Amino acid sequence: MNESPPAVDSDDEATSSSEEPQAGDGSNESYAAHGNYHSGDYSHGEAPSPYHSYPNYLYESSENPISRGTAAIPPSSVHTTSSTTQDVTFDVAIFCALPLEADAVETLFDNRWDAEGGTGRYSKAYRDPNSYSMGPMGTHNVVLVHMPGMGKSHGAAAAAWCRASFPTIKLALVVGICGGAPTAPDGKVIRYGDVVVSSALVQYDFGRMHGDGFVRKDTLLDNLGRPGMEIRSLLARLDGRWGQKRLGDKIRRHVGVLVQELGRDYVYPPGHGVGEPTIHIGLVASGDQVMRSEEVRDRLIEKEGVIAFEMEGAGIWDTFPCLVIKGVADYADAYKNKNWQNYAAATAAACAKGFLELWS
């Protein structure tokens, strides 16, 4: 299987390669594709900001069209198993547990290869129960995994089958919504709609129950591993001033596209001070329990130094090189509600695409 060409580390949208791609080996990630692929970007400048003048950008118009870029790694033109079958190498998998999370991610595809009546269809491993959507994001070919439910077990099963069907995946992103800590260990306030990116995961519900309470297993062999050097290097870059600015600009731009296509439900909720999302990089707690206890939450924040709580990452972490990218929809306490979920899903999807545009 051929390796994907490196991404261009630039703020400009990626364009299609001028070199003719080579045929793959006809393995399980093969799919049929036909039609024309054109390179390009979001035309007529940046998509309008989602933080100002809501009525002016909710709908596409002749003055404000939405156009899509396409894959920098287009499907091969060399036929394999049939006159219409072509090979493509997928290097990124994105896992979403909720439909609203997947909607936001799929909307940011530069093209949709598997859409009904569209340009492509694909095959997967025998008995693979996963449902996939496929398309390019910048220079990366992405497979979106629609998980059947929340939790580590669903994440682990979906990741195992995804690896069987797409053995060339180099990076998995777990994208969606989470509960956030009110304040990060560095003292920064975490607001609704901010984006959390994992530097590592803490599996907080893995341990022993004693008579006087639960004790988490925290030995070296019981903990989830840290990301590889390449991911850690990029996280260090993104945690700096200019890295935060570049990624923040991309998030603002992509959220604007999401609001245009998905409507007002993905706008910053009314009645709150308008602000752009901040990126927080740190430890993320992952477990099967929905965190709705302020007391337990604060104890884990103090003891483990976590900045957010989510439910799928621990199941996927050991199968692929992995990052959790999630928007803060609540504070993991008794006041949880769904008012911020769409906006948090939008900022997370926008951050995921911005991350892929900076990752090679």
Image (tube, helix red, strand yellow):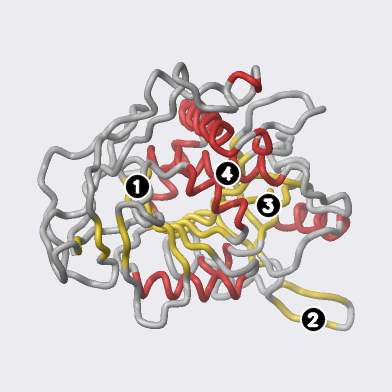
**Mark before the other along the chain sequence, 1 or 3:** 1
From the top left corner, tell me how far across and down residue 244 is, in percent.
Answer: 52, 30
The residue to which callout 1 is attached is 136
The residue to which callout 3 is attached is 178
Q: What amino acid is found at the position of numbered circle 1 in the picture?
A: Pro
* CA separation in Å, label 3 and label 2: 26 Å
Q: From the viewer's perspective, tell me whether residue 185 is left or right of residue 232.
A: right
| CA neighbours of label 1 inside 10 A, class few (<14), some (14 to 19), many (20+) | many
Which residue is rendered at x = 42% and y = 44% of the image? 109
Which residue is rendered at x = 35% and y = 72% of the image? 124
Q: Is there CB contact under 8 Å for labels 3 and 2? A: no
From the top left corner, tell me how far across and down residue 291 is, in percent.
Answer: 78, 60
Most distant residue in the front direction: 117
The residue to which callout 2 is attached is 209
Q: From the viewer's perspective, tell me whether residue 104 is left or right of residue 85.
A: right
Q: Nearer the viewer, residue 9 or 151?
A: 151
* CA separation in Å, label 4 and label 1: 17 Å
Q: Is residue 312 above or below residue 338?
A: below
Q: From the viewer's perspective, tell me whether residue 49 is left or right of residue 131.
A: right
From the top left corner, tell me how far across and down residue 275 is, in percent.
Answer: 69, 25
Q: What amino acid is found at the position of numbered circle 3 in the picture?
A: Cys
**Mark before the other along the chain sequence, 2 or 1:** 1
* CA separation in Å, label 2 and label 1: 46 Å
